[in-house]
Image (cartoon, grey):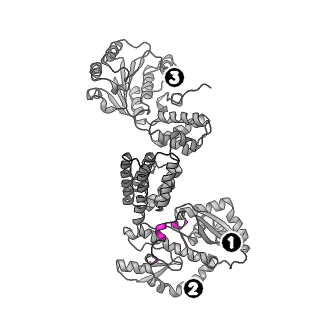
Amino acid sequence: MNYQVSARKWRPMSFPDVIGQAHVVQTLVHAVEGKRVAHAYLFSGMRGVGKTTVARILAKAMNCHQGPTPTPCAECQSCVEIANGQSFDVMEIDGASNSGVDDVRSLRENIKIGPAKGARRVYIIDEVHMLTTNAFNALLKTLEEPPAHVIFIFATSELHKIPLTILSRCQHFTFRRIPVQTITDHLQHIVAQEAITISPRGLEITAKAADGSLRDALSLLDQIVAFAGQEVADHQIDTVLGNIPHELRREMFHAVVTRDPARALEVVWAVGDQGGDLHRFLGDLVEDVRSLIVLKISPKSLGRIDVSEGLNREAEEAVRTLTIDDLQRVFDILTQAQDHLKHTEFQNYVLEMAVIKVCQLAASESVSHMDMTNCAKDQITTSRTQTSLETPQAITRGQVSRTTKPSVATRPKSQRVTAPGFSRPIGSKAPVIPNDKKTTRMSTLTIDWTELVERVGVEKPNLATYLEAGVPVKVENGIILIAFSENRDMCREVMARDDNQQYVQNVCRSLCGSEVELKFVRLAKSSEPVKTIGELGQEKHKKQAQNLRDRTLDHPSVRMVLDEFGGQIQDVCEDRAQEGESQ
Ligand SMILES: [Zn+2]
């Protein structure tokens, strides 16, 4: 097979092909069109972002036999020779190996000769910052009185090393670091052409690893394909890039959001076990937290910062659950740990302590959140023991998450705010406490069974009728069991169809903000008859009418609100068959 490295094979040949430098390209195109091309250009920017590529295209544009034209033909002798690096009129000079004053002197002799075939002689001096001071001085004289047929294009990745005297005589363009998304899109285009199979996530981590350099991205792609062949699996990319598996980062996030130091420790150990670089892992976490802070401050920036695809859900959850203060403290702890890592031989200990601190910080900052979660948990427990008698009305996000919170379990019961009966967790709807108060800062999201059925009914009324025939009986490990009595088998079968199940799961997720799985099961014959929403609603309505006011006034959360904020209860009204309080 005639193998050519991707960076060379896919090097842009015309201005429109240049990736991610539209601001430079547009200016140059206008200059060529308007015959206002300067005598000296300085292209600065990190490696692999297209500086010499654009320089060559400009050389072609000036020397094309049909030009000067911003759209060189790519077919004439001049275009072909420049593309192959064989043109006498385009000199590419490596500043690093031609850095002395003698080199510049011979260059000055050389430029006196007019162009051989094209219109201009183009000198592309790469890594021009490597020139010695004397060489720069010699060059300066040429730049002061350049021959009309000469164009200089200097390229550098270290702009600060260019003397101001040189800089001021050049038209300067800054080449930008190329965004991850742009690189990803370009890689996608290439793998499609090359019949390479690689997942979107794989392309994204490759693009990220390239750190803004398109050339690096293409080199990495070559390495990956050399290692894995045409069918690339994500873990093979992780191996080539030396990445810590993405899953572990997600796990760590989940541990922080759910305040689970034990799980966080396991993640640290797993990174160590897999031979991962702890320093890099910590760096990844710092980057993630920084992204979250930016997201929190400016939700519009989602497209601008590099939150990776797989992390999005965790990121959204964290943005919703943690305050900017929380996140900044997490950031501080992690960056301090980064510092400590450099000076210790016990890197794993430093990281362990850091993640424990982060989880505990989050926990101590959100006591009220846990209380809210907890009161709903009590409800679920109650309804679980009376499976066929009552419909659990509220399933909190905390409850469906896969991780339990040890700190909740150890809290004395007397401190818990427990809502009786069917009430929603406080703060889930119609907040009675101002939002800026600490107690409602971490609001608890709720899946309300009735609300779920209603929401499904908006788009799919028929489906809602079937769903309504079941009752949620159990929540475990993120799975909600919905039971149907035997005489409603047909409803259960309809619900269990893939598309229907998926639809309801999606509605669930949009209600509670986390992944939920539904299972539709048949109630055993011996079970008590199941009461559906309609039946329960009637019973409840009767009961509620009698004791709504008493219960509300006696409600611990109402008392808590009154104690804390004063005021008195004027009216108690029903909120969609739920109790509601207003001051
Ligand atoms: Zn041409």
Looking at the picture, tell me which residue is in the foreground, 484 or 450: 484
User: In this orientation, which residue lies closer to the viewer: 464 or 95?
Assistant: 95
Please tell me in which quadrant of the rendered image residue 200 appears.
top right
Q: Secondary structure at mark 3?
A: loop
Q: Which mark is residue 72?
A: none
Which residue is under mark 1? 484
Q: CA distance from mark 1 to mark 2?
A: 25 Å
Q: Judge from the rendering whether residue 291 lies leftward or rightward of residue 462; answer left or right.
A: left
Front-most of residues 171 and 159: 159
Query: Which is nearer the N-term, disc 2 or disc 3?
Result: 3
Disc 1 from disc 3: Cα separation: 71 Å
Q: Which residues are magenta?
A: 390-414
Q: Identify the amino acid type marked 2.
A: Lys
Q: Which label's residue is closer to the chain start, 1 or 2? A: 1
Q: Are marks 2 and 3 in contact (CB under 8 Å)?
A: no
Q: Which residue is mark 3?
A: 74
Packing grade of label 3 (10 A; few <14, some 14-19, many >=20) is some
Residue 428 visible: no
Amino acid carrying label 3: it is Ala
Q: Which mark is residue 542?
A: 2
Instruction: Indicate yes or no whether the magenta region holds residue 403.
Output: yes
Q: Is mark 3 within 8 Å of ligand 1?
A: yes
